[in-house]
Every structure is written in C-alpha cells, then in structure tokens.
Image: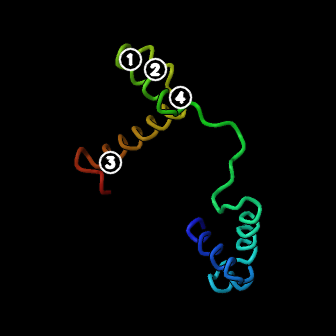
C-alpha cells in the first residue's frame, strides 16, 4: 500500500475526491480516505511512529557483544542467546535429520 500513497496524494492535490481516486486506482474508498486524512494531519504520507517498546535484544551492538563472548568462551556465551533462536535452530536440525534418514544418506534438499 505504501507504493500507492504518493499517487493518491498527487491525485488529491489535483482536486480529485477520495471516491474518484479509489475508483481510478481500484482501491477501497476507506483506505484512500485514511491516507488523505493522514496527509492533511501530518503533511506527510509516511508511516506514523509506532507505539511500544523498541526492540533491544537484536541490536547490532548486542549481536557484536554476543559474537565476542562466543569467541572467548562458548560455554558462557550460550546463556546470552535468546531462547527463541535456540529453539528454531533445534527445530531446523531435527527436520533436516529426519529428511536425511528418510533419504537413506542420499541428497534430500530437493525432496
């Protein structure tokens, strides 16, 4: 939808109504009117600031810190890896192992 915002605003500034724009661009009228309203309120058609706490676990600084810990002491670094990443790695390993066993040691990537 972001790709259409500039065109919607351009057509609105040319004097077209929200309904006409929605018909011309084959979009829902409520969507077009919401974009026009946001533009009138903020003078911009970019996304508004999101509420909520920003992500802090997977910042580049933390990734570098964890990588350094792993290189210095792999055992201690294990505790700083988020549990969801560990779970995903284990799930992927089990799926790959199962496919390998089913393939009888042959190639299994394309099956």
The residue positioned 69% from the left and 47% from the top of the image is 50
Q: Earlier in the sequence, mark 1 or mark 3?
A: 1
Q: CA distance from mark 2 to mark 4?
A: 9 Å
SS at mark 1 in the image: helix
Residue position for label 2: 78
Q: Is residue 38 left or right of residue 78?
A: right
Marker disc for residue 102: 3
Q: Earlier in the sequence, mark 4 or mark 3?
A: 4
Residue position for label 1: 74
Query: Relative to residue 40, is residue 69 depicted above or below?
Result: above
Residue position for label 4: 82
Image coordinates for residue 105, horizontal then vertical, percent: 24, 44
Callout in the foreground (4, 3): 4
Q: CA distance from mark 1 to mark 3?
A: 33 Å
Callout in the foreground (1, 3): 1
Query: Relative to residue 28, is residue 51 depicted above or below?
Result: above
Task: State if disc 3 and disc 4 touch (CB < 8 Å).
Answer: no
Q: CA distance from mark 4 to mark 3?
A: 31 Å
SS at mark 3 in the image: helix
Callout 2 crowding tier (Cα within 10 Å): few <14, some 14–19, many ≥20: some
The residue positioned 76% from the left and 67% from the top of the image is 37
Task: State if disc 1 and disc 2 touch (CB < 8 Å).
Answer: yes
Q: Earlier in the sequence, mark 1 or mark 4?
A: 1
The residue positioned 69% from the left and 53% from the top of the image is 48
């Amino acid at each position: 939808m972001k790709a259409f915002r500039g065109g919607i605003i351009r057509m609105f500034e040319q004097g077209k109504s929200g309904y006409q724009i929605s018909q011309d661009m084959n979009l829902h009228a409520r969507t077009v009117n919401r974009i026009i309203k946001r533009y009138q309120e903020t003078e911009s058609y970019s996304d508004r600031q999101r509420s909520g706490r920003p992500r802090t676990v997977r910042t580049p600084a933390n990734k570098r810190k964890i990588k350094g810990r792993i290189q210095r002491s792999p055992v201690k670094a294990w505790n700083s890896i988020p549990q969801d990443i560990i779970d995903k790695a284990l799930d992927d390993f089990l799926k790959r192992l199962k496919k390998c066993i089913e393939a009888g040691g042959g190639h299994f990537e394309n099956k």
